[in-house]
Image (spheres, rainbow, N blue to C red):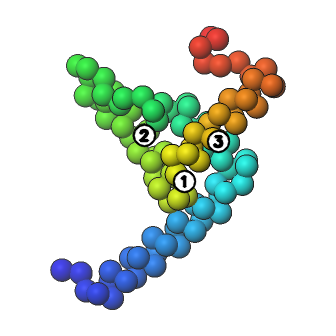
């Protein structure tokens, strides 16, 4: 069983990590990185691949990384939607080809 001191220390470490995540992804550039990861790794798509447990596990692993970034960065769903739209607009202005274009 964990002692109160151990639990307190774990909370401090998690808070310290969360601070780094927030700092890394609070800038516009950091938010664009998160938006690109969300888009690239299909965060909004179902991770289940019928008949293929290995692909399902792989997909869920990708989603889990993004979930961790979002959680530790204290991003809200509205924030995610806003930065995703902003990234799409920037890519459109720059003429960046979309995955569907290939």
Q: Which mark is residue 83?
A: 3
Q: Residue at x 68, y 50 (%)?
A: 30
Q: What residue did someone put label 1 on?
A: 75
Q: Position of residue 22 (x, y in %)?
A: 60, 61
* SS category of the residue bearing label 3: helix
Q: Which residue is nearer to you in this view: 82 or 98?
A: 82
Q: Which residue reaches farthest left?
A: 1
Q: Which mark is residue 11?
A: none
**Marker count (numbered):** 3
**Location of residue 96 with respect to 23 vertically, above or below:** above
- Front tag of 1 and 2: 1
Q: Tell me if residue 65 can be seen.
A: yes
- Front tag of 3 and 2: 3
Q: What quarter of the picture does the N terminus occupy? A: bottom left
Q: Position of residue 53 (x, y in %)?
A: 25, 28
Nearer the N terminus, badge 3 or badge 2? Answer: 2
Residues at circles 3 and 2 in contact by the CB criterion of under 8 Å: no
Q: Position of residue 4 (x, y in %)?
A: 29, 87
Q: Residue at x 65, y 19 (%)?
A: 98
- Left or right, 23 with reference to 49: right
Nearer the N terminus, badge 1 or badge 2? Answer: 2
Q: Which residue is nearer to you in this view: 42 or 85?
A: 85
Q: Position of residue 24 (x, y in %)?
A: 65, 58
Q: Cα distance, mark 3 to mark 2?
A: 18 Å
In the figure, residue 3 lies in which quadrant? bottom left
Q: Cα distance, mark 3 to mark 1?
A: 10 Å
Q: What quarter of the picture does the C terminus occupy? A: top right
Q: Residue at x 25, y 20 (%)?
A: 50
Q: What residue did someone put label 2 on?
A: 63
* SS category of the residue bearing label 1: loop
């Amino acid at each position: 069983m964990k002692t109160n001191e151990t639990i307190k220390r774990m909370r401090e470490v998690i808070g310290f990590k969360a601070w780094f995540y927030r700092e890394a992804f609070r800038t516009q550039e950091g938010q664009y990185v998160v938006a690109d990861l969300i888009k690239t790794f299909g965060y909004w798509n179902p991770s289940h691949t019928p008949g293929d447990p290995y692909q399902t596990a792989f997909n869920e692993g990708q989603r889990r990384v993004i979930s961790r970034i979002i959680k530790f960065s204290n991003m809200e769903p509205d924030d995610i939607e806003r930065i995703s739209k902003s990234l799409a607009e920037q890519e459109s202005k720059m003429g960046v080809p979309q995955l569907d274009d290939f």
